[in-house]
């Protein structure tokens, strides 16, 4: 096994780690898949927003800078991370609200269908929204089971999607296991029954290369505070393929999603294109850190980011096999099916994570017995991974 020092020395992206705020007591940050670290440059970017864009320009900032920012950032996310042409991605509400909008829009686009399909162990927000929307609309939820260390597959999807399905909501990269689904194949299965495919890409965007246009994806959504490092509560994004945009009915119509928002007319007429998915005023302050991180991703390239992600997770698995032999890997060993985090199950996980946090080693606990190790390629070094896994081994013991 290569040493951490050798891997860091050979890493073409090594210099990027120095662009993030170091953290005073940080020994190893292994939770970039929950909350990405802030960039040092964002301190100046936030000051520029407050002092110049907001402080100097005041209300004029809307006409001069801000009204188009949700679509501009959406286009940048689409180009750098999603394989999406311009005009199909917009930044705006929380992931929760974006999922709600897309599912409600999908149901309206598939009248007469009676089911929504989702994994039984999908991220809680996704499940809660699907259950509530199904209950409100008299639909049934078809719950799907997947292996503990896996996620949705074309074969599993084929067993549950039917002509009754209005839409399926699956994670591109599973939040617990890091299973990276065969997204084009699963999309094809769902669409073969006339249903709409919605991908939750919260754990995929910025860590694995996505090709939503080429894969024929209908809709997608994701947060921006994990591998996009937008900060706590950063606005989410949504993608709607151009072929569907004029059919989408926004269930939360707001003034900036209207065709002529400043006309102040009676009645709602939706904007053309992706802007019809906008509701209220865009969260301009929350977009600043996201824009900074996109500049890094654009410079590094998603292919290089993915290559380092594979090396980081593979190195972590080798260390776990060596140092924690009684732990169970709950993530794919096949790198082609693995995102940028891994989960190990161990009966001492909850207590160990609590101890590690106090020591400046930050992994993530996942009920009931999982330790989730998130390795954000641009901010994580191989030495940091080794320090973290060695500390984890000691804490679990």
Image (tube, helix red, strand yellow):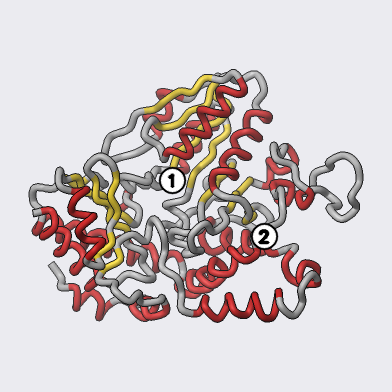
Q: Nearer the viewer, residue 187 or 285?
A: 285
Relative to 381, residue 318 above or below: above
Q: Secondary structure at mark 2?
A: helix
| Residue 172: numbered disc | 1
Relative to 186, residue 340 above or below: below
Q: Nearer the viewer, residue 106 or 212?
A: 106
**Picture residue at 19% right of the left edge, 48% below the top:** 349
> How far from the left and from the top, in percent, is residue 237?
58, 53
Q: Quote the CA–CA distance across marks 1 and 2.
A: 23 Å
User: How dense is the environment of label 2, judged by Cα within 10 Å: few (below 14), some, or many (20 and up)?
Assistant: many
**Picture residue at 87% right of the left edge, 55% below the top:** 262
Residue 334 seen: no
Q: Are marks 1 and 2 in contact (CB under 8 Å)?
A: no
> How far from the left and from the top, in percent, is residue 30?
29, 62
Q: Quadrant of residue 392?
A: bottom left
**Picture residue at 28% right of the left edge, 34% below the top:** 147
Q: Nearer the viewer, residue 157 or 198?
A: 198
Return the residue at label 2. 70
Q: Quadrant of residue 59?
A: bottom right
> How far from the left and from the top, in percent, is residue 394?
10, 60
Name the quarter where the N terminus is drawn.
Answer: bottom left
Between circles 1 and 2, the one closer to the viewer is 2
Q: How many marks?
A: 2
User: How dense is the environment of label 1, judged by Cα within 10 Å: few (below 14), some, or many (20 and up)?
Assistant: many
């Amino acid at each position: 096994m290569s040493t951490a020092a050798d891997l860091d020395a050979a890493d073409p992206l090594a210099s990027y780690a120095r662009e993030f705020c170091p953290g005073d007591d940080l020994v190893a940050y292994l939770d970039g898949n929950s909350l990405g670290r802030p960039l040092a440059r964002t301190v100046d970017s936030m000051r520029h927003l407050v002092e110049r864009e907001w402080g100097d320009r005041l209300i004029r900032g809307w006409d001069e800078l801000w009204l188009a920012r949700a679509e501009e950032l959406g286009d940048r996310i689409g180009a750098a991370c999603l394989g999406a042409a311009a005009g199909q991605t917009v930044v705006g509400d929380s992931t929760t609200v974006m999922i709600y909008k897309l599912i409600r829009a999908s149901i309206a686009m598939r009248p007469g269908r009676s089911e929504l399909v989702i994994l039984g162990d999908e991220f809680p927000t996704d499940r809660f929204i699907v259950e509530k929307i199904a209950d409100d609309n008299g639909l049934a939820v078809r719950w799907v089971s997947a292996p503990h260390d896996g996620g949705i597959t074309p074969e599993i999807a084929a067993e549950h999607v039917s002509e009754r399905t209005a839409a399926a909501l699956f994670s591109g990269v599973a939040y617990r296991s890091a299973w990276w689904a065969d997204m084009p194949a699963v999309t094809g299965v769902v669409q073969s029954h006339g249903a709409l495919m919605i991908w939750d890409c919260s754990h995929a965007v910025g860590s694995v290369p996505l090709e939503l246009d080429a894969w024929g994806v209908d809709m997608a959504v994701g947060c921006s505070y994990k591998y996009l490092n937008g900060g706590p509560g950063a606005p989410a994004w949504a993608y709607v393929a151009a072929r569907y945009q004029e059919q989408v009915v926004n269930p939360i119509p707001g003034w900036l999603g209207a065709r002529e928002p400043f006309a102040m007319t009676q009645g709602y007429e939706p904007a053309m294109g992706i802007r019809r998915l906008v509701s209220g005023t865009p969260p301009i302050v929350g977009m600043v850190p996201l824009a900074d991180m996109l500049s890094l991703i654009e410079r590094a390239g998603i292919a290089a980011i993915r290559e380092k992600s594979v090396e980081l997770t593979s190195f972590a698995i080798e260390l776990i096999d060596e140092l924690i032999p009684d732990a169970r890997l709950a993530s794919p060993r096949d790198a082609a099916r693995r995102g940028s985090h891994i989960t190990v199950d161990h009966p001492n996980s909850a207590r160990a994570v609590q101890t590690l946090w106090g020591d400046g080693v930050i992994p993530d606990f996942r009920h009931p017995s999982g330790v989730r190790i998130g390795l954000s390629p641009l901010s994580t070094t191989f030495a940091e991974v080794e320090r973290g896994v060695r500390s984890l081994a000691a804490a679990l013991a």
